[in-house]
Image (cartoon, rainbow, N blue to C red):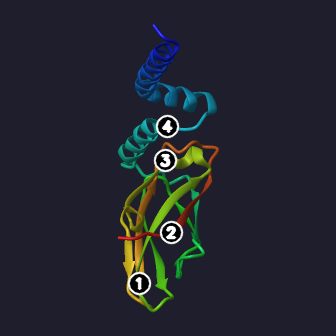
Amino acid sequence: MSSVEGRKRRTLLLLMGLAIGMFGFGFAMVPLYGLLCRVTGVQSVEQRAMIGARAQAATSGVVRDRWVTVKFDTTIHPDLSWKLEPMERKLRVHPGEHYLVKFIAENRSGQEITGQAIPSIAPWQATGFFAKMECFCFNRQTLAGNEITEMPLRFSVSPDLPADIDSLTLSYSVLQVSD
């Protein structure tokens, strides 16, 4: 066997090993992601879904002797010619009760633009205890040129919210999207 054939054989074996390794790594990604989330304390998608379902189920009883302050914040990407502001900057709520807050959205350009609001909750430990029943963030929003509209948010805070959390902030980052 010549040295050229030996190099070809080694290269072929190396590439086959690499392909098998990549295939195996694809199967290992899910458990590795779960391990990384547990080690770093970050909630995995699965944990968020379970907590969200628990929060939805727990909203049946209103806790009248507890108040939680919910603050609303918006950030608009600089390339998006929109203005989005809550009609109320903060709201004191009873856990378990449903509330409606409206946001005013304004397209400051003369042309139709589609945007998407991405929500986040701070502190992150409260994320699974904040349930949105109706939210403009569920879908892309298209505003005609110079259009002003109200966008609703219907939500509740779970009675199971840890007692040491008495205030949370719901932030929306709004980005322009293409259809």
Residue 93 image offset from top left, x and y in percent: 52, 61
Q: Residues within 10 Å of mark 1 (few under 14, many from 20)?
A: some
Residue 39 image offset from top left, x and y in percent: 61, 27
**Residue sitting at 51 percent across and 88 percent down?**
108
- Residue placed under numbered mark 2 in the picture: 175
* Mark 2 residue type: Leu
Residue 43 image offset from top left, x and y in percent: 53, 38
Whole-number angstrom distance, CA of label 1 to CA of label 4:
35 Å
Q: Secondary structure at mark 1?
A: strand
Q: Earlier in the sequence, mark 1 or mark 4?
A: 4
- Residue placed under numbered mark 1 in the picture: 149
Q: Secondary structure at mark 4?
A: loop
Q: Earlier in the sequence, mark 1 or mark 3?
A: 3
Q: Is residue 164 above or below residue 132?
A: above
**Residue sitting at 37 percent across and 42 percent down?**
53
Numbered mark located on residue 44 in the image: 4
Q: Nearer the viewer, mark 4 or mark 2?
A: 2
Q: Earlier in the sequence, mark 4 or mark 3?
A: 4
Rendered image quadrant of residue 132: bottom left
Along the line of sight, the residue nearer the viewer: 52 or 69? 52
Whole-number angstrom distance, CA of label 2 to CA of label 3:
25 Å
Whole-number angstrom distance, CA of label 4 to CA of label 2:
24 Å
Q: Is residue 89 above or below residue 13?
A: below
